Image: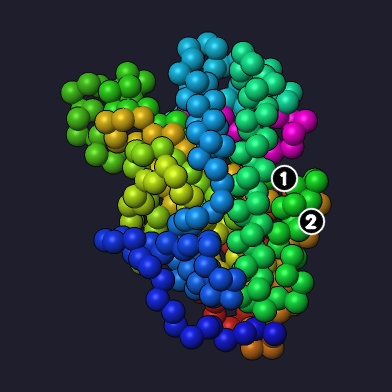
């Protein structure tokens, strides 16, 4: 059954940009309505009072800064990111480039412990800090997904969170580091004469939607993230180091049969200070089937997507460019319009 949209509720908007801010300490029934509304209208919102301690965030940031502060040779010991490990400028296998370096980790604790040998001088501490951070942000993601299921009257309230709680979940953690403009110019082969003309819109991480179910993004106090909210307009997202931004991914778009739409976003790298972001991508196990939940399918709203496994979707994503609309590959073309892009 597809429930009608809840009665309009005003969410507190972050001034000037209109991104909703949701207080996770509100009562559950209010919260589930606010979250569903934010997912439907924006696919992107900020959460406050999320319950993750400042210490867990600070320790993770410290490890990230320590790693990116190392020499290139040291960092390269943890690469190449194919798919996990250290990467620089090259995003994915299809020629996408950005003004950033990153560390991509699988959230499986065995994988973290193996990788940490090449990442840190104190691998035990590194693994411990990363596992604590992942555990904490996973809880935030699961809580939000349970609230989504409640707000949408899905019968099994844990059906979404179970996918990312699964021991075989394919969730990831990526630390991104965008150097300050001064350092970008050091990296850049563009003749110095022309560089000042392009520093206003340097792409750190190009436009894309996240393929997974739900993303939990944290950054330091340096801006750069932008989200495409309506009509392709890019809206700058104010950085907030103590809170998290939540982003609807492609898989959640499919699970809700297009009722939620994954949010396209990008990061610019034109700041006078380096930006670091820590991004958790909540994903199902590779062999999980992803398809619209029965609650969202009816004769009036037939399924918009063919079922696929998460593994098939990832392979499709890896075969395309970052900004390509991968969901098109799995769309069922019927006569009833949908709101996907
Ligand atoms: O650094 C950011 O804020 C954006 C990062 C991002 O979109 C990603 O890692 O997928």
**Residue 130 falls in image quadrant:** top right
Q: In which quarter of the image is residue 143?
A: bottom right
On the picture, is 14 further left or further right than 298?
left
Q: In this view, does 26 lie above or below 266?
A: below
Residue occupying image coordinates x 54% and y 17%: 75
Which secondary structure lies at badge 1? loop
Q: Can residue 90 be seen in this view?
A: no
Tell me if I can see residue 157 in this picture.
yes
Question: Which residue is at 41% across, 37% downward?
Answer: 220
Left or right relative to 156: residue 198: left
Image quadrant for the N terminus?
bottom right
Task: Verify whether residue 103 appears in magenta.
Answer: yes
Residue 223 bears which disc, if any? none
Q: Residue at x 56, y 71 (%)?
A: 27
Residue 288 in the figure: left or right of residue 13:
right
Residue range highlighted in magenta: 101-112
The residue at which mark 1 appears reads as: 170
Q: Estimate the spatial distance between the alpha carbons at disc 2 and disc 1, rounded to whole Å.
A: 10 Å
- Residue at 70% over, 76% down: 154
Identify the residue position indicated by label 2 in the image.
288
Q: Where is residue 329 in the image (x, y as percent from the top left)?
A: 63, 60
The reply to whether the magenta stretch includes residue 35 is no
Q: Where is residue 156 in the image (x, y as percent from the top left)?
A: 77, 72
SS type, badge 2: loop
Mark 2 vs 1, N-terminal side: 1
């Amino acid at each position: 059954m597809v429930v009608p949209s809840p009665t309009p509720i005003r969410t507190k908007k972050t001034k000037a940009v209109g991104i909703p801010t949701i207080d996770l300490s509100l009562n559950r029934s209010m919260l589930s309505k606010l979250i569903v509304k934010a997912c439907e209208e924006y696919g992107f919102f900020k959460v406050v009072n999320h319950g993750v301690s400042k210490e867990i965030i600070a320790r993770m940031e410290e490890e990230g800064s320590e790693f990116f502060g190392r020499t290139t040779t040291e960092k390269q010991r943890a690469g190449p990111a194919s798919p996990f490990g250290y990467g620089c400028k090259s995003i994915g296998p299809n020629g996408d480039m950005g003004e950033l370096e990153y560390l991509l980790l699988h959230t499986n604790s065995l994988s973290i412990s193996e990788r940490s040998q090449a990442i840190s001088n104190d691998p035990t501490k590194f693994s411990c800090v990363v596992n604590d951070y992942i555990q904490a942000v996973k809880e935030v993601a699961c809580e939000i997904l349970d609230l989504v299921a409640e707000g949408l009257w899905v019968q099994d309230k844990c059906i979404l969170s179970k996918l990312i709680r699964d021991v075989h979940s394919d969730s990831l953690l990526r630390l991104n580091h965008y150097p300050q403009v001064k350092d970008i110019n050091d990296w850049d082969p563009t003749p110095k004469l022309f560089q000042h003309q392009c520093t206003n819109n340097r792409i750190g991480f190009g436009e894309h939607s996240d393929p997974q179910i739900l993303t939990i993004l944290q950054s330091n106090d340096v801006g750069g993230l932008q989200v495409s909210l309506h009509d392709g307009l890019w809206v700058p997202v104010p950085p907030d180091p103590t809170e998290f931004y939540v982003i609807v991914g492609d898989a959640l778009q499919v699970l809700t049969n297009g009722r939620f739409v994954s949010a396209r976003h990008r990061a610019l790298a034109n700041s006078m200070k380096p930006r670091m972001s820590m991004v958790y991508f909540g994903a199902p196990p590779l062999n999980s089937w992803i398809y619209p939940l029965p609650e969202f399918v009816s004769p009036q709203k037939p399924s918009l997507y063919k079922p696929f496994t998460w593994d098939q979707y990832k392979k499709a994503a890896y075969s395309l460019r970052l900004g390509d609309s991968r969901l098109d590959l799995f769309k069922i073309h019927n006569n009833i319009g949908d709101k996907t892009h």
